[in-house]
Amino acid sequence: MANLAISITLGGFNPAEAITSAGSVVTWTNKDDPALQSTHTTTSNDGLWDSGPLNAGNAFTHPFTDPGDFSYHCAIHPSETGIVKVFFPAAG
């Protein structure tokens, strides 16, 4: 199992396209300057997860058990989008 970290800022998600294996846990963290008071979310386009508002320094974690492409966005800043691409790990 792998862990993957994604940062959120007013510039969007970094990385915007993340690739990981099934069984991984992804953590999104709002890395904006606390002085900006910018709140973000990570919200699945398919309704699979919604972090709710994340203030600067707060994080949200979601496990990915199945392979596929999972698109998401920030519900507060709809132009901020990303995708998590999940694959089955190679056997052996």
Image: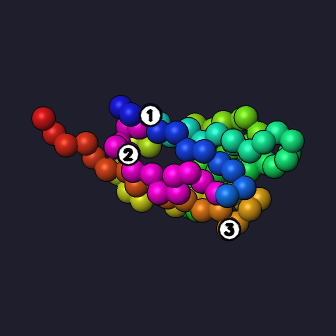
The image quadrant where one finds the N terminus is top left
Alpha carbons under labels 2 and 1: distance apart: 8 Å
Q: Is residue 72 left or right of residue 64?
A: right
Amino acid at circle 2? Thr
Range of residues picked out in magenta: 12-24
| 2 and 3 marks in contact (CB < 8 Å) | no
- 14 is within the stretch colored magenta: yes
Compared to residue 39, the image places residue 3 above or below, namely: above
Q: Residue at x 69, y 50 (%)?
A: 9
Q: Position of residue 3 (x, y in %)?
A: 44, 34
Q: Residue at x 53, y 57 (%)?
A: 16
Q: Residues within 10 Å of mark 3 (few under 14, many from 20)?
A: few
Alpha carbons under labels 3 and 1: distance apart: 26 Å
Q: Residues within 10 Å of mark 2 (few under 14, many from 20)?
A: many
Sequence-wise first label, 2 or 1: 1
The image quadrant where one finds the C terminus is top left
Q: Determine which residue is flagged by label 1.
A: 3
Q: Determine which residue is flagged by label 3.
A: 79
Q: Residue furthest bottom?
A: 79
Compared to residue 50, the image places residue 74 above or below, namely: below
Quadrant of residue 69 within the rendered picture: bottom left
Q: Secondary structure at mark 3?
A: loop
Q: Determine which residue is flagged by label 2.
A: 20
Q: Position of residue 44 (x, y in %)?
A: 59, 56
Amino acid at circle 3? Ser
Q: Visible in this render: residue 2?
A: yes
Sequence-wise first label, 3 or 1: 1
Quadrant of residue 77 within the rendered picture: bottom right
Q: Is residue 28 left or right of residue 78?
A: left
